[in-house]
């Protein structure tokens, strides 16, 4: 389940559906298990298989998905790189928490605090959607006050947020969480576990293509 642009308001403090049982591995079908991204988007490192997660801290389903995704990432081979892209859908509230993501990344606190951000918003019902509140929260969590103040509204962070929204448009993202593989495939699936199973199969497909074994196959 995803939070769409339209359902933002009604779901901001809702809880996600129960996690489903993992699905078995199966062959992938275009239009069913994944959607081809047209045109295909460039990735940063041709030597790696790139997986993107488009998400927002404000999305309850992203909060439910995060521990599953974290465990899945830890199992990936060295040729796979997973990147998270916070997006805003044009909402000022989500822009502030996208800025929080990049600020924590720059200050070196992201790994330590990411789960805490989801917990604060969706379990503790803290309103981290305005600059004053999110700043107070970060400082209470031990983030350096000077670094946070210099970073949160910096040109670099604002540029990253803008770039994330541009990427969401290029990838035709209409709801989050959403996974994309190698700039070519937007992952489908009826639940989180199935989506990760499909992602595994698409990674194997790309790995085969990169090695030349699957060249030309669809």
Image: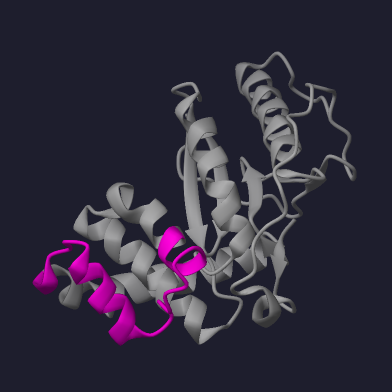
Tell me which segment is drawn in magenta: 119-146
Q: Position of residue 187 (x, y in %)?
A: 73, 44
Query: Within the image, what quadrant is residue 158 found in?
Result: bottom left
Residue at the spot x=24%, y=59% of the render?
Answer: 106
Nearest the viewer among 10 and 98 is: 10
Residue at the spot x=56%, y=83% of the render?
Answer: 91
Residue at the spot x=31%, y=54% of the render?
Answer: 113
Q: Can residue 42 be seen by looking at this rendering?
A: no
Query: Within the image, what quadrant is residue 59 found in?
Result: bottom right
Nearest the viewer among 30 and 41 is: 30
Q: Does residue 62 sit above or below 129 in this rendering?
A: above
Q: Position of residue 122 (x, y in %)?
A: 51, 65
Q: Position of residue 60 (x, y in %)?
A: 60, 63
Residue at the spot x=46%, y=60% of the render?
Answer: 118
Residue 27 covered by magenta stretch: no
Q: Position of residue 97 (x, y in %)?
A: 42, 72
Q: If the image is split into quadrants, where does the C terminus sit?
A: top right
Q: Does residue 38 sit above or below 212 in this rendering?
A: below
Nearest the viewer among 131 and 180 is: 131
């Amino acid at each position: 389940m995803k939070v769409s642009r339209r359902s933002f308001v009604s779901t901001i403090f809702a809880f996600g559906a129960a996690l489903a049982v993992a699905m078995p591995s199966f062959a992938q079908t275009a239009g069913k298990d994944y959607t081809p991204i047209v045109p295909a988007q460039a990735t940063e490192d041709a030597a790696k298989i790139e997986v993107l997660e488009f998400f927002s801290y404000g999305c309850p389903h992203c909060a439910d998905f995060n521990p599953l995704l974290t465990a899945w990432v830890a199992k990936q081979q060295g040729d796979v790189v997973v990147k998270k892209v916070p997006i805003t859908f044009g909402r000022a509230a989500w822009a502030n928490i996208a800025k929080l993501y990049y600020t924590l990344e720059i200050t070196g606190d992201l790994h330590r605090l990411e789960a805490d951000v989801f917990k604060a918003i969706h379990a503790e019902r803290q309103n981290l959607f305005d600059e004053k509140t999110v700043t107070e929260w970060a400082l209470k969590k031990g983030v350096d006050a000077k670094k946070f103040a210099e970073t949160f509204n910096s040109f670099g962070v604002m540029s990253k947020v803008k770039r994330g929204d541009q990427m969401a448009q290029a990838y035709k993202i209409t709801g989050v969480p959403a996974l994309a593989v190698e700039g070519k495939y937007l992952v489908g699936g009826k639940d989180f576990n199935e989506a990760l199973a499909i992602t595994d199969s698409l990674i194997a497909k790309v790995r085969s293509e990169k090695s030349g074994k699957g060249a030309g196959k669809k």
